[in-house]
Amino acid sequence: MSGHGRAGAPPWEGAAHWEGEPVTAWAARWGCSRVEAYDVVGSTSDRVRALAAAGAEAPLVVLADEQRAGRGRAGRAWASPRGGLWASLLVEPAGQGSVLPLVVGLAVA
C-alpha cells in the first residue's frame, strides 16, 4: 500500500493505491461503491461500521495490511499482524439465518 493515506488527509482516509493500482480501479473491478486500503488500521470492521452509519452505499470493501484492534467472534482478541490481508465487506443485509458469512469464508479459503 502507499502509506496511511495522503499527507494532511484525515486519518480515516485510506491509501490511494493498493497493490500498485488506484483503489478506484479495484472498486470498479469488484463492482463496489468504494474500496479503502490501509497499511495499519484499528479494525477493518470498525471502519465498515462507521461508513455504514454515515450512509455509505454497499457493497464496499476495507482492506488492511495490519489491524491493531481486530476482534473475533464474541469479542475475542484477533491477531492481525502484517503479512496477511485483512478485509471487511459491507453488503446488503441478507436476512436472519443467512449463510453468506460461511460462503464468503469458504470462497476465501
Image (cartoon, rainbow, N blue to C red):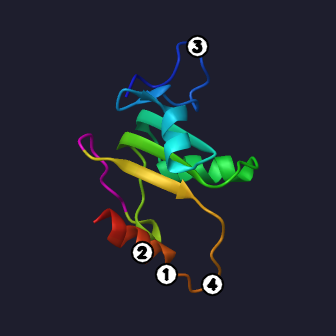
Q: Residue furthest left?
A: 83
Contact flag, marks 2 and 4 (Cβ < 8 Å)? no
Q: Which amino acid type corresponds to the residue marked 3 in the rendered image?
A: Gly
Q: Position of residue 1 (x, y in %)?
A: 37, 28
- Residue for point 42% across, 68% down: 104
Kindly give the residue lying farthest to the front in the view shown. 29
Mark 2, residues whose alpha carbon is within 10 Å: few (<14), some, or many (≥20)?
few
Q: Is residue 39 above or below residue 8?
A: below
How many angstroms separate mark 1 from mark 4 (CA)? 9 Å
From the top left corner, tell me how far across and down residue 99 is, in percent: 49, 81
The disc, 2 or 4, on the residue closer to the chain's N-terminal end is 4
**Label 3 sits on residue:** 8
Question: What segment carries the magenta color?
Answer: 77-83
- What is the distance, in whole Å, between disc 3 and disc 4 at their CAs? 42 Å
The amino acid sitting under disc 2 is: Val
Query: Residue furthest toward the bottom?
Result: 97
* 47 in the magenta segment: no
Read off the residue under disc 1: 99
Q: Badge 4 is on which residue?
A: 96
Q: What main secondary structure does the magenta stretch of the protein show?
A: loop
Report the residue marked by disc 2. 103
Residue shown at the point (27%, 47%) measured from the top left: 84
Asked if the residue under mark 1 is in contact with the one under mark 2, i.e. CB atoms within 8 Å, the reply is: yes
Mark 3 → mark 2, Cα distance in angstroms:
39 Å
User: Between disc 3 and disc 2, whose residue precedes?
Assistant: 3
Q: Nearer the viewer, residue 5 or 105?
A: 105
Q: Residue at (62%, 24%) from the top-left corner? A: 10
- Answer with the quarter of the image where residue 109 lies: bottom left
Label 2 secondary element: helix
Residue occupying image coordinates x 35% and y 67%: 107
* Above or below, comparing residue 77 to residue 60 in the picture: below
**Secondary element at image label 1:** loop
